Image (tube, grey):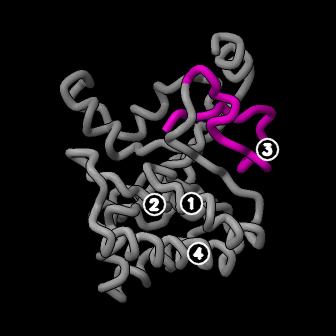
Amino acid sequence: MRRIVRRCYSSSFVDTHCQLDQIYELRKAARPESETKFEMIDKFSPQLDACITVGNNPDTLDEVVSYLAHDKVFGAFGIHPFQAERWESNQSVQEKFKKLLTHKKCVAVGGCGLHFGDKITGRPLPQSLQEVQKKVFTEQVKMAIDFNKPLVVYDRKAPEVERMTALMYSLPPFVWCAEKCSQKNPVNCCVFRKPLRSCPRICPRII
């Protein structure tokens, strides 16, 4: 792990999955009150070539988009599995996400996928909710194909992801983020078939 981290940070790298709006909020107690979100980003590692902030909650999309004004920040937009019901029942939510995929700094669809464990208890979700997630995830995959975007996938307590990968063969090069990976084997955590920016190395993320 040390060798991998050292190799990633010895030159420029791309953080392929961050949520800058949440980071800024979590830093509230520690950062100076006057610090802006762009000043926060400027304090990141000087080796940071670019980062991809994720917008997968309809309630925070506008805030996420505001970060794209920073030169080093790019976006990925797709519905989180816990928000799948809102996607299915709300046409305006679908249209908003699709519009964001045309943003000049949107580089991927996601993070989306399947998460069959309850967020609090970890117990399996009802079968009806699992089916909604599978249907919405299929739509996200097709959306990535339609917009010719890479796909960021969450695999959380959902072996069905493996049985749905046939859909992904038509995708452009994609980023796969799986919870089942571990820090003992970070190389297998994420598969990067193509850098999202001309950067010599991309640092794997443990999601």
Ranked by sequence position, the earlier of labels 4 and 1 is: 4
Check whether the beta carbons of the residues at disc 1 and disc 3 lie within 8 A of each other: no
State the extent of the magenta-drawn residues as a range.
183-207
SS of the residue at dot 2?
strand
Check whether the beta carbons of the residues at disc 3 and disc 4 lie within 8 A of each other: no
SS of the residue at dot 3?
loop
Within 10 Å of disc 2 (Cα), the crowding (few <14, some 14-19, many 20+) is: many
Amino acid on which the number 3 mark rests in the picture: Ser
Check whether the beta carbons of the residues at disc 4 and disc 1 lie within 8 A of each other: no
Q: Position of residue 16 (x, y in %)?
A: 59, 43
Q: Residue at x 67, y 67 (%)?
A: 149
Ranked by sequence position, the earlier of labels 3 and 2 is: 2
Instruction: Tell whether 143 sits left or right of 129.
Output: right
**Disc 1 to disc 3, how far (Cα)?**
30 Å
Amino acid on which the number 2 mark rests in the picture: Leu
Viewer-proximal residue among 8 and 160: 160
User: According to the image, label 4 marks what residue?
Assistant: 102
User: According to the image, label 3 marks what residue?
Assistant: 198
User: According to the image, label 2 marks what residue?
Assistant: 114
Instruction: Tell whether 66 sits left or right of 162.
Output: left
Q: Position of residue 27 (x, y in %)?
A: 28, 29
Ranked by sequence position, the earlier of labels 1 and 3 is: 1
Within 10 Å of disc 4 (Cα), the crowding (few <14, some 14-19, many 20+) is: few
Check whether the beta carbons of the residues at disc 1 and disc 2 lie within 8 A of each other: yes
Ranked by sequence position, the earlier of labels 1 and 2 is: 2
Q: Is residue 60 magenta?
A: no
